[in-house]
Amino acid sequence: MKIEEIKGLEEYLTQFPVFEYQVIESKELFFEPRVRVICQQECERFGTTWACPPGVGTLEECERRCLAYPYGFFFSSVAEVRDVLDMQELLATRDAHEALTGEIGAYIQRQGYDCYILSTESCDICDTCAYPDEPCRFPDRMHPCLESHGVVVSDLVERHQMAYSLGGNTVLWFSLILFREA
C-alpha cells in the first residue's frame, strides 16, 4: 500500500510537524521478548497501567492484535530540549507527539479505516490508572507504547532508512498507527 491510497493523508500531514514517515506492512514487524524484559527490569510503569505489560496482554496476544491490521503508518516527530539528559524536560515534549498521533489516527479513521495505535506513552491520561482493578477509562484515547508490544523501534527505523537520532539536544518520538479496512 502507498500513502497515496489513504485519501488526502499526504496533504493532511503538511499541517503537522511530522519529521519522517513510511507506510509499512505489519508482517514486517518483529516482536521480541527481550524488549519486554527491559520493560520489566527498567521501567517504573511496568505493571501499573493498561498501556504497559502485563496490562497490554502477553507478547503473543500483542503480536496477534498487531498482525490483524495489514498496514501501518510509522512516523516520527522532533522535539528540542535544553538538556537531552534532563528526563523531565525530555518527557514533557512527549505530549505534543501524543496529540499529533491522536490527530493522525483520527484522520485515518475518518477515511474509513479501523486503527490500532501504538505510540510513546505508558499513558498519562488519568492521574491514577484503573489498572488492574477496573477497565481502562479511555481505551479510545490510550495508545500503548510500541515497546510494550515487543516492537524494536530501532530495527524498524533502520529497515526503512529513517533517522533514529539527530544528535544535539533533540529527541525523536515514534508512533505506529496500524490500520485495516473498516
Image (cartoon, rainbow, N blue to C red):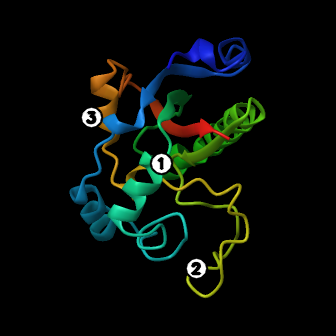
The residue to which callout 2 is attached is: 131
Query: Depth check: 85 or 12 in front?
Result: 12
Mark 1 vs 2, N-terminal side: 1
Residue type for callout 3: Asp
- 59 relative to 66 in the view: left or right: left
Q: Secondary structure at mark 1?
A: loop
Query: Depth check: 106 or 88 in front?
Result: 106
Count numbered badges in the picture. 3
Q: Residue at x 47, y 37 (%)?
A: 70
Inter-mark Cα distance, 1 to 3: 21 Å
Residue 98 screen position, x and y as percent: 63, 43
Inter-mark Cα distance, 2 to 3: 30 Å
Mark on residue 34? none
Q: Residue at x 71, y 18 (%)?
A: 7
- 104 relative to 132 in the view: left or right: right
Residue type for callout 1: Ala
Query: Depth check: 20 or 42 in front?
Result: 20
Residue type for callout 2: Tyr
- The image quadrant where one finds the C terminus is top right
Q: Secondary structure at mark 3?
A: helix
Mark 2 vs 3, N-terminal side: 2
- Mark 2 Cα shell of 10 Å, populated few (<14), some (14-19), many (≥20): some
Mark 1 vs 3, N-terminal side: 1
The residue to which callout 1 is attached is: 68
Asked whether residue 40 is in view, the answer is yes
Relative vertical location of residue 38 with respect to residue 180 in this rendering, above or below: below
Mark on residue 155? 3
Q: Residue at x 70, y 55 (%)?
A: 141
The answer to whether the residue labelled 2 contacts the one labelled 3, judged by CB atoms less than 8 Å apart, is no
Residue 158 screen position, x and y as percent: 28, 25
